[in-house]
Image (cartoon, helix red, strand yellow):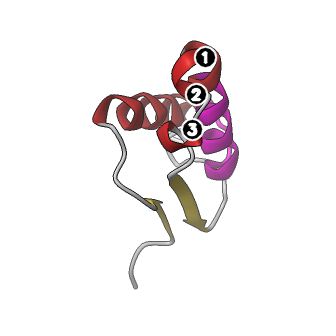
Amino acid sequence: SGPSSVMASLWSVNDRSNSEVVHNFYDYMSKGKTKAESLRLAKLKFIEDYPLESSSPYHWAGLVYIGEDGSSPLHHQ
């Protein structure tokens, strides 16, 4: 029992930065990407969309994914 995967933050992150990454994470998952790939792509999109802020990993690197990496159940509905 329990969750098969978790996304967690390693440190306190700016709410705007965190919400951008998480929003894009779910967007990529809804397109059938795996969870790990969705998080990677969401971080890259943040860096692309906010180049001045992304110069510091503080804004995007704190989120990590732990667990099963199957494709999103959102895609299979």
- At 42% from the left and 28% from the top, the residue drawn is 20
Give residue 2's quadrant in the image: bottom left
What residue sits right under mark 2 in the picture? 54
SS state under label 1: helix
**Do residues under tags 2 and 1 come within 8 Å of each other at their CB atoms?**
yes
Q: Position of residue 77 (x, y in %)?
A: 49, 40
- At 52% from the left and 49% from the top, the residue drawn is 73
Q: Nearer the viewer, residue 54 or 37?
A: 54
Q: Position of residue 34 (x, y in %)?
A: 67, 47
| 14 w.r.t. 31: above or below | below
Q: Residue furthest bottom?
A: 1
Between marks 2 and 1, how big is the CA–CA gap?
5 Å
Between marks 1 and 3, how big is the CA–CA gap?
24 Å
Q: Nearer the viewer, mark 2 or mark 3?
A: 2
Q: Amino acid at mark 1?
A: Pro
- At 66% from the left and 51% from the top, the residue drawn is 36
What residue sits right under mark 1 in the picture? 51
| 36 w.r.t. 44: above or below | below
Q: Quadrant of the N terminus?
A: bottom left
Q: Is disc 2 surrounded by few (<14), some (14 to 19) or many (20+) residues within 10 Å?
A: some
Start and end of the magenta stretch? 31-45
Q: Position of residue 75 (x, y in %)?
A: 56, 38
